[in-house]
Amino acid sequence: MTREFILGVDLDGVCGDYTAAFRAVVAADRQVAPETLVDARTWDFAEWGIHGPEEFDRLHRLAVLEHHMFRTMPTLPGVAESLWRLSDAGIWIRIITHRLCVNWGHAIAVADTVAWLDDKGIPYRDICFLGAKPEVEADAYVDDAAHNVQALRAAGNPVIVFDAPYNQAVEGPRASSWAEVEALVLDWVSERGIPLQSTLPGLDEGADRLTHRVTHPWG
């Protein structure tokens, strides 16, 4: 019996636009225009004048606990649609995120994350809140953080690098859109000889199917 193909999917910078969401918080804290905080940033946000982990931790805590960034973060284009197509094809979507890094804020982080996934119509079979991603069993991963990509590959895992200014030194395979992620994943599934499924009859089309079922339970 052929088992399912498990795809480990990061959230921040891969499904959600962390840079845009965090920019709004930092701009409000600094009382500056958001456009003064550049897109072409490094991992530590040094270009935004954030110097050292203590300053980042203060701003990140503010973003999570007071601004509810994990509930309001914009999605990256096409993420829900691509993940639904992959899920419909029989691929197990496993969300893997390191969001429990704010002490005494875990309840807010978890609740806002789950609410955001539902609100944005992003499908998943299970969700893991942890930082050590090589410990999670998946057949392939999508991540934007260079240290995660390197650790996952060191453990023998195939990883798609979701393109960002701060990960340009990392070797591919690389995707700059969710359409490209989808194509790479389908190629890997095909190479392993795992048959793809067709959408089951009676299921709604589109990424808003969860919202439709909640608001229109009888059809």
Image (tube, grey):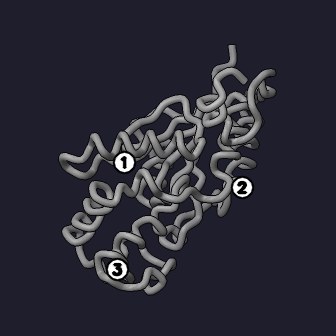
Give the Cα distance between marks 1 and 3: 21 Å
> Residue at 29% across / 76% down in the picture?
29
Residue 5 visible (yes or no): no
Q: Residues within 10 Å of mark 1 (few under 14, many from 20)?
A: some
> Residue at 65% across / 58% down in the picture?
77
Position in image of residue 15 (x %, y %): 55, 52
Q: Is 198 drawn above or below residue 58 in the view shown?
A: above
> Residue at 72% across / 31% down in the picture?
88
Q: Give amino acid for label 1.
A: His
Secondary-structure class at tag 3: helix
Secondary-structure class at tag 1: loop
> Residue at 54% across / 55% down in the picture?
14
The part of the image, by quadrant, that contains residue 191 is top right
Nearest the camera: 102 or 196?
102
Q: Give amino acid for label 2.
A: Glu
Q: Quadrant of the C terminus?
A: top right
Q: Quadrant of the N terminus?
A: top right
Give the mark, 3 or 2, whose residue is nearer the N terminus: 3
Position in image of residue 130 (x %, y %): 35, 42
Give the mark, 1 or 3, whose residue is nearer the N terminus: 3
Nearest the camera: 175 or 115?
115
Position in image of residue 38 (x %, y %): 47, 82
Q: Which residue is mark 3?
A: 46
Q: Which residue is mark 1?
A: 98
Q: Residues within 10 Å of mark 2 (few under 14, many from 20)?
A: some
The part of the image, by quadrant, that contains residue 213 is top right
Q: What mark, if any, has residue 34 been given in the picture? A: none
